[in-house]
Image: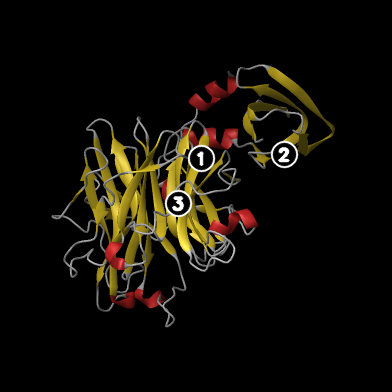
Amino acid sequence: MFFLTFLCMITLPAAKAQTEWSKYEGNPVMVKDTTLHGLWEWAGIGQPSCLFEHDTFKMWYAAAGVAFLGDTILRGRIGYAFSISGSTWVKQEPLEPVLDVGDSTAWDSRWCDTPAPLYDGIEYKLYYYGDSQSVVFSAIGVATSPDGISFTRYGNNPILKRSPEIMDWDGFWVESPAVLYDSTYGMYSMWYTGVGYGPGHPGDTWIRIGYAFSYDGLTWVKDTINNPVLETGAPGSWDDGWVAVPAVRWEDGQYEMWYCGASIADWLPDSSLDTGRVGYATSPDGITWEKYPGNPVITTFDPPVDSGGPWAPDVVCDGYSYHMWYEAINGMHYATAPSNGSTTQVLFDYINAFHIQPNPCRNTCTITATQPLHSVFLYDITGRLITIMHNDTPTCQMHLDMKEIPSGIYFCVPVSGSEIVGKIVVHP
C-alpha cells in the first residue's frame, strides 16, 4: 500500500501536456508483411485507429496489396492488431483482413480505408472510407461486430456521401471519419475530411474537416450550418493548404482534436509534401474549435526524423498518458505525451519504472529496470503464484524464458528494491 499512499501525496501542476510529444526511438512499431500470406498488405500499411480496452491497445489499420500471386489490381483492406505496451504489436493470426473489399458491383469493391472503430456498449462499429476506384462513388460506410474482428456490413451503406453539388466544400469526396458516442444523450458524432474545389490550394483541392451527427450510428445528418468546422489557416501559416484526417477524443470536459495540416509552401512540383505536421485543437461542443497557438505539436523533423510522416494520427489516453500512432513511409510510428492529471503522470512514471520487451511475447522477453533485478515473481490473473525466475547475476536487465508458460495474461513483480508491478501477455 506504500506506493498508493505515496501517489496520493503528490500533485503536479496541470498543463497542456498533450501537446508535448516524444517520438519512440524504436520507430516504426509496425511494418507491412512481405511474406506470401501478407499479400493483401505487401504494398503498405497506415491509417492507424485505436481503442484502449482492459489494459490493451487495439488497432484497426488500412493496408494495400493484392489478393493472390499474379493479381495486378491493388486494393485496400482493413486489418487488426493488439498491444500491451503501445510499441510492440501483434497482428491477428491468421493474418487476414477483418474487412475485405465488397463484391465487384459494390460501392466499396476497390478500396476500404481510413478505419474508425467505436464500441458503443452494444457492439463494435467500424466506420471506413470506401470506393470503387471512382470519385463519384467514394463515401463512408459502417460495419458492425460483436468482438471487433468478425464484421458485417450495414445493409444500407454508404452512410455518408459527398455533397451532390460539385462546388460544395465536400463536393469531390469524403473520407477519414473519427466517431465518438455520447451515452448520456444517445448521440453519435462524426468528424470527417471533406474535399472540394480550391484554386490556389495544392492540386486545386481544398481539404477541410466537417461534422455530422446521428442517433443510431447508422443514419447521419451533416451540419450544413457550421461545416466545415475546422478551416485551413491564414495565408502563410503551416496549415494554409489543407487540414485533414482528424482524431477526436473527449477528455477533461472538452473535445480534443489532432489533425494533419499542409502548407502551400510545402507542396513540391511532383505533388508531394516535404514536411508532415500534426496540429491540436480543442472545443467545448465539437463544432467551435480553437487551434493551439503553439501548433504544430509534432512534425517530420522532430527527432527521430520521419520520412513520409507524420500523417493520419490517432490518439488515445489510458488514464496515465497520451499515446499517438501515425503513418510514415516505412510503416506505423509511435509517440507519447503526458496527461494533464495531477497524479496520473506520477503513476505513469511509477508503473513504467521497468520495461518489458516484447510484450506480448511468445517464447522469451526481457525486463529492463532502473535498478538491479534479483528475481521476478509471476502471477496469473487470479493472483496465484506461477513461478519465480532468478537472475544469477543481478543487473538492470533480465531475460525471462516463457516457453513453458501457457498463453494468457500475467502480472510480474520484479524484486529490485522497490515495489513495482507489470503485466505480460504470453501469446500462443
The structure residue drawn at horizontal position 59% and vertical position 52%, both measured from the top left corner, is 29
The structure residue drawn at horizontal position 67% and vertical position 39%, both measured from the top left corner, is 361
Q: Where residue 365 is drawn, which disc sits there? A: 2
Q: Is residue 166 left or right of residue 83?
A: left
Looking at the picture, which amino acid does disc 1 mark?
Phe
Q: Which residue is mark 1?
A: 57
Residue 136 vs 118, above or below: the answer is below
Viewer can see residue 150: yes
Q: Quadrant of the C terminus?
A: top right
Looking at the picture, which amino acid does disc 2 mark?
Cys
In terms of depth relative to the viewer, which is nearer, 203 or 346?
A: 203
Q: Earlier in the sequence, mark 1 or mark 2?
A: 1
Q: Which residue is mark 3?
A: 100
Q: CA distance from mark 1 to mark 3?
A: 22 Å
- Verify CB contact (< 8 Å) between mark 1 and mark 2: no
Q: Is residue 345 left or right of residue 245?
A: right
Q: Residues within 10 Å of mark 2 (few under 14, many from 20)?
A: some
Q: Earlier in the sequence, mark 2 or mark 3?
A: 3
